[in-house]
Image (cartoon, rainbow, N blue to C red):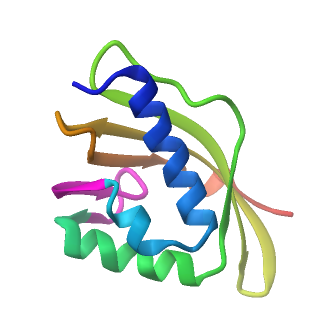
Amino acid sequence: MPSEEAMKAAMQAYIDRYNAEDAEGLIDLYADDAVVEDPVGGATYEGKEAIAEFYRYAIQTGAKLKLQAPIRASHGNAAAMAFTVELTHEGQPMQIHVIDVMTFNAAGKFSSMRAYWGKTDMKVR
Protein backbone atom coordinates (compact mmCIF):
# COMPACT_ATOMS: atom_id res chain seq x y z
CA MET A 1 0.00 0.00 0.00
CA PRO A 2 1.39 3.45 -0.85
CA SER A 3 2.21 5.86 1.96
CA GLU A 4 0.06 8.89 2.74
CA GLU A 5 2.79 11.10 1.26
CA ALA A 6 2.87 9.08 -1.97
CA MET A 7 -0.93 9.23 -2.34
CA LYS A 8 -0.98 12.99 -1.72
CA ALA A 9 1.86 13.49 -4.21
CA ALA A 10 -0.02 11.51 -6.87
CA MET A 11 -3.16 13.57 -6.28
CA GLN A 12 -1.16 16.80 -6.59
CA ALA A 13 0.44 15.45 -9.78
CA TYR A 14 -3.09 14.88 -11.13
CA ILE A 15 -3.93 18.58 -10.62
CA ASP A 16 -0.57 19.78 -11.95
CA ARG A 17 -0.57 17.59 -15.05
CA TYR A 18 -4.17 18.42 -15.88
CA ASN A 19 -3.47 22.15 -15.65
CA ALA A 20 -0.28 21.74 -17.72
CA GLU A 21 -2.39 19.99 -20.39
CA ASP A 22 -0.14 16.94 -20.01
CA ALA A 23 -2.67 14.26 -20.93
CA GLU A 24 -0.10 11.48 -21.26
CA GLY A 25 1.45 12.30 -17.86
CA LEU A 26 -2.01 12.35 -16.30
CA ILE A 27 -2.98 9.03 -17.88
CA ASP A 28 0.26 7.49 -16.59
CA LEU A 29 -0.99 7.99 -13.01
CA TYR A 30 -3.59 5.25 -13.65
CA ALA A 31 -3.25 1.48 -13.50
CA ASP A 32 -3.98 -0.42 -16.72
CA ASP A 33 -7.23 -1.84 -15.27
CA ALA A 34 -8.41 1.34 -13.54
CA VAL A 35 -12.00 2.59 -13.52
CA VAL A 36 -13.10 6.25 -13.66
CA GLU A 37 -16.65 7.30 -12.73
CA ASP A 38 -17.21 10.98 -13.54
CA PRO A 39 -19.62 11.96 -12.16
CA VAL A 40 -20.64 9.25 -9.70
CA GLY A 41 -23.87 7.83 -11.06
CA GLY A 42 -22.91 8.94 -14.58
CA ALA A 43 -20.41 7.78 -17.15
CA THR A 44 -17.89 5.05 -16.30
CA TYR A 45 -14.59 4.56 -18.15
CA GLU A 46 -12.93 1.16 -17.72
CA GLY A 47 -9.34 0.44 -18.69
CA LYS A 48 -6.52 2.73 -19.59
CA GLU A 49 -7.56 3.34 -23.23
CA ALA A 50 -11.08 4.49 -22.27
CA ILE A 51 -9.61 6.64 -19.50
CA ALA A 52 -7.09 8.10 -21.96
CA GLU A 53 -9.87 9.11 -24.37
CA PHE A 54 -11.79 10.74 -21.50
CA TYR A 55 -8.83 12.85 -20.36
CA ARG A 56 -7.62 13.78 -23.85
CA TYR A 57 -11.08 15.22 -24.51
CA ALA A 58 -11.39 16.87 -21.07
CA ILE A 59 -8.05 18.65 -21.37
CA GLN A 60 -8.99 19.98 -24.82
CA THR A 61 -11.93 21.87 -23.28
CA GLY A 62 -9.50 24.29 -21.65
CA ALA A 63 -10.83 23.60 -18.14
CA LYS A 64 -8.49 24.27 -15.21
CA LEU A 65 -8.51 22.73 -11.73
CA LYS A 66 -8.02 24.68 -8.50
CA LEU A 67 -7.65 22.96 -5.12
CA GLN A 68 -10.05 24.26 -2.46
CA ALA A 69 -8.55 22.47 0.56
CA PRO A 70 -5.53 20.33 1.36
CA ILE A 71 -5.49 16.86 -0.19
CA ARG A 72 -6.59 14.24 2.34
CA ALA A 73 -5.08 10.78 2.68
CA SER A 74 -6.49 7.81 4.59
CA HIS A 75 -5.41 4.93 6.79
CA GLY A 76 -6.00 2.70 3.78
CA ASN A 77 -5.41 2.93 0.05
CA ALA A 78 -7.51 6.00 -0.77
CA ALA A 79 -7.22 9.77 -0.85
CA ALA A 80 -9.61 12.63 -1.60
CA MET A 81 -9.43 16.23 -2.76
CA ALA A 82 -11.89 19.08 -3.12
CA PHE A 83 -11.35 21.36 -6.09
CA THR A 84 -13.09 23.68 -8.49
CA VAL A 85 -13.18 23.13 -12.24
CA GLU A 86 -13.14 26.46 -14.07
CA LEU A 87 -14.34 26.30 -17.66
CA THR A 88 -16.41 27.96 -20.34
CA HIS A 89 -19.57 26.03 -21.20
CA GLU A 90 -21.81 27.16 -24.05
CA GLY A 91 -20.12 30.56 -23.99
CA GLN A 92 -20.56 31.10 -20.24
CA PRO A 93 -17.79 30.98 -17.64
CA MET A 94 -18.66 28.21 -15.19
CA GLN A 95 -17.35 26.58 -12.03
CA ILE A 96 -18.00 23.03 -10.92
CA HIS A 97 -17.30 22.15 -7.28
CA VAL A 98 -15.94 18.60 -7.20
CA ILE A 99 -14.58 16.05 -4.74
CA ASP A 100 -12.49 13.29 -6.28
CA VAL A 101 -11.77 10.11 -4.38
CA MET A 102 -8.98 7.90 -5.71
CA THR A 103 -8.03 4.40 -4.63
CA PHE A 104 -4.50 3.15 -5.20
CA ASN A 105 -2.97 -0.19 -6.08
CA ALA A 106 0.20 -1.56 -4.47
CA ALA A 107 2.34 0.16 -7.14
CA GLY A 108 0.92 3.56 -6.20
CA LYS A 109 -1.18 3.94 -9.37
CA PHE A 110 -4.83 5.02 -9.30
CA SER A 111 -7.03 1.94 -9.44
CA SER A 112 -10.21 4.02 -9.37
CA MET A 113 -11.36 7.61 -9.47
CA ARG A 114 -14.85 8.69 -8.45
CA ALA A 115 -15.87 12.32 -9.02
CA TYR A 116 -18.60 13.63 -6.72
CA TRP A 117 -20.55 16.55 -8.15
CA GLY A 118 -24.12 17.21 -9.18
CA LYS A 119 -26.08 19.71 -11.23
CA THR A 120 -26.34 22.09 -8.26
CA ASP A 121 -22.53 22.12 -7.99
CA MET A 122 -22.29 23.89 -11.37
CA LYS A 123 -22.34 27.67 -11.05
CA VAL A 124 -22.07 30.55 -13.51
CA ARG A 125 -19.00 32.66 -12.62
Position of 2 relative to 43 (above/below): above
Residue 9 place in picture, x, y as percent: 48, 37
Q: Nearer the viewer, residue 112 or 91?
A: 112
Work out whether residue 60 can be spotted.
yes
Name the image quarter holding the N terminus. Answer: top left
Name the image quarter holding the C terminus. Answer: bottom right
Instruction: Give the residues drawn in magenta, as a range.
Output: 30-44
Question: For the view shown, which residue lies furthest in the left direction?
Answer: 33
Residue 75 place in picture, x, y as percent: 34, 12
Task: Name the magenta segment's main secondary structure.
Answer: strand
Q: Residue at x 32, y 62 (%)?
A: 28
Residue 14 place in picture, x, y as percent: 49, 53
Q: Nearer the viewer, residue 30 or 63?
A: 30
Residue 60 place in picture, x, y as percent: 56, 84
Q: How many marks?
A: 0
Question: For the view shown, which residue lies furthest in the right direction?
Answer: 125
Position of 116 relative to 32 (above/below): above
Work out whether residue 100 can be spotted.
no
Position of 51 relative to 68 (above/below): below
Q: Nearer the viewer, residue 40 or 66?
A: 66
Q: Nearer the viewer, residue 13 or 82?
A: 13
Classify residue 43 by image quadrant: bottom left
Q: Residue at x 45, y 23 (%)?
A: 73
Classify residue 16 by image quadrant: bottom right
